[in-house]
Image (cartoon, rainbow, N blue to C red):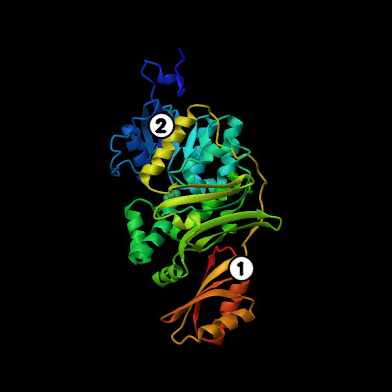
């Protein structure tokens, strides 16, 4: 008789009949994400141990917290730590307060989980260094591609994470807004309000629209994947607020879409990066990522890897945070990047461009093409509609595009607007 096949080996606690001790959680902040963490912890059925939120640090204990009314609230951090939580979850949003409180927890060797992008972009390496020195778990999986667990996987895979370039859609709100503009013809303000109602946007949605949120996430990815530490301010960052529905239609005519893209690349010439709305051909993997979905393409020496899934929203974010909580109580290891290059200078890349020129009386298209050509900007697609002309160019630098548009509007009154186009030639 053959032995039965072993199909799965589970955690030893799976076989124990003793009731598992709950994992206790202290929340720093009880806003939309904090409340979702509390709700999800209460309702969870899949965790190997029950999850119990023992208290939350808040600014105002009297404020209503829909869905999290039962959570004890305090304004006194010492009182919260006195409850001896197994893990501290930081969901404050604020940078300096979060940094101080996380440092306090790590110094007491209390594991910490955060989803704070702005904090991690600026002080992530410092906090990670403290976590490593004190041997305390410190996890930030929900800070990038909130609903897609991948950072932890790569921390444990030093060979797979030799990344030379990465590009992605790192902000759910702006991808949702641009997708809605294309699918429904609705404008920027209307679709941004919708994103807020659905809980995708930041408390200050200008952080999403301006590209700052995606720049923070790109900076985290840069050091996590060993491309170097980069100040988010050093990354060329353009908002989506210059895009109108005519641009979306023109992109469609060029067999493409406009997406909020972030990219960093390391080559013999140095490191280049940008964040902003970009034209992508429909065939590009990122062009097929719709709505609040986020995606990431990692270019490694072992091939291209593609990840996608929900990038924002209380439930995906809370789920990833709670997985980090469970993980943090297991091994005590912080997420750690596999290699580091220290601070690196970063510049804008040379790419193709998607240009729009509008005027009450535009010169004929071939005159515009000829004028831009005299500045070394050559187009391979043009489209004239109403009072506008759209062009797709061959690669050149931003300086050259800005100089040509400036000269053109001096020669013939018109408004020029340029976004990057990720087109292969
Ligand atoms: N406001 C962010 C977004 C939330 O829309 O992507 C997730 O980081």
Front in this rendered view, residue 207 or 393: 393
Q: Residues within 10 Å of mark 1 (few under 14, many from 20)?
A: many
Which label is found at residue 395?
Answer: 1
Mark 1 or 2: in front is 1
Residue 242 visible, this orientation = no
Residue 352 position within the rendered picture, expressed as x and y whole percent measured from the top left: 58, 67
Does 332 sit above or below residue 390? above
State whether residue 296 appears in this view. yes
In the rendered image, residue 24, in percent from the top left (x then y), is placed at 40, 28
User: In the displayed image of the protein, which residue is found farthest to the right?
Assistant: 268
- Residue 64 spot, x, y in % from top left: 28, 44
Residue carrying label 2:
25
Q: Position of residue 164 (x, y in %)?
A: 63, 50
Identify which residue is drawn at 36% across, 43% down: 315
For the N terminus, which image quadrant? Answer: top left
> What residue lies at 45% left-to-right and 51% top-to-bottom?
294
**In the depicted structure, whether residue 368 falls above or below residue 228:** below
In the structure shown, which secondary structural element does the residue marked by tag 2 occupy? strand
**Distance from Cα at disc 1 to Cα at disc 2:** 51 Å
Query: Circles 1 and 2: CB distance less than 8 Å?
Result: no
Taking the image as shown, residue 412 lies to the left or right of residue 78, namely right
Which residue does the image show at 49% across and 82% down from the upper left? 414
């Amino acid at each position: 008789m053959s032995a039965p096949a072993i199909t799965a080996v589970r955690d030893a606690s799976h076989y124990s009949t003793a009731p598992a001790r709950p994992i206790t959680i202290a929340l720093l902040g009880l806003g939309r994400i904090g409340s979702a963490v509390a709700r999800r912890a209460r309702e969870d059925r899949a965790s190997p141990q029950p999850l119990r939120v023992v208290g939350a640090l808040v600014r105002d204990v009297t404020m209503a917290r829909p869905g999290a009314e039962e959570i004890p609230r305090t304004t006194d951090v010492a009182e919260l730590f006195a409850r001896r939580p197994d893990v501290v979850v930081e969901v404050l949003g604020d940078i300096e307060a979060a940094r101080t409180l996380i440092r306090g927890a790590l110094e007491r060797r209390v594991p910490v989980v955060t989803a704070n992008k702005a904090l991690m972009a600026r002080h992530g390496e410092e906090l990670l260094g403290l976590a490593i020195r004190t041997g305390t778990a410190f996890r930030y999986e929900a800070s990038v591609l909130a609903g897609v667990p991948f950072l932890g996987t790569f921390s444990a895979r030093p060979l797979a994470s030799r990344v030379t370039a990465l590009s992605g859609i790192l902000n759910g709100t702006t991808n949702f807004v641009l997708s809605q503009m294309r699918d429904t013809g609705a404008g920027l303000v209307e679709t941004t309000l919708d994103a807020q109602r659905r809980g995708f946007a930041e408390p200050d949605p200008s952080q999403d629209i301006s590209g700052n949120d995606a720049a923070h996430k790109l900076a985290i990815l840069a050091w996590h994947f060993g491309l170097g530490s980069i100040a988010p301010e050093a990354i060329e960052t353009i908002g989506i607020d210059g895009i109108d529905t005519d641009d979306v239609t023109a992109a469609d005519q060029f067999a493409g879409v406009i997406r909020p893209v972030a990219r960093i690349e390391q080559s013999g010439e140095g490191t280049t990066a940008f964040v902003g709305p970009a034209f992508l051909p429909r065939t590009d993997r990122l062009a097929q990522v719709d709505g609040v979905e986020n995606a990431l393409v990692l270019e490694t020496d072992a091939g291209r890897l593609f990840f996608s899934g929900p990038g924002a929203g209380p439930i995906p974010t809370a789920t990833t945070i709670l997985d980090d909580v469970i993980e943090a109580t297991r091994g005590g290891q912080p997420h750690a990047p596999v290699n580091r290059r220290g601070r690196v200078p970063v510049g804008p890349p040379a790419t193709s461009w998607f240009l729009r020129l509008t005027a009450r009386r535009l010169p004929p298209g071939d005159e515009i093409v000829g004028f831009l050509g005299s500045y070394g900007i050559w187009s391979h697609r043009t489209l004239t509609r109403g009072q506008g002309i759209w062009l797709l160019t061959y690669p050149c630098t931003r300086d050259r595009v800005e100089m040509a548009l400036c000269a053109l509007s001096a020669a013939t009154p018109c408004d020029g607007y340029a976004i990057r186009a990720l087109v292969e030639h």
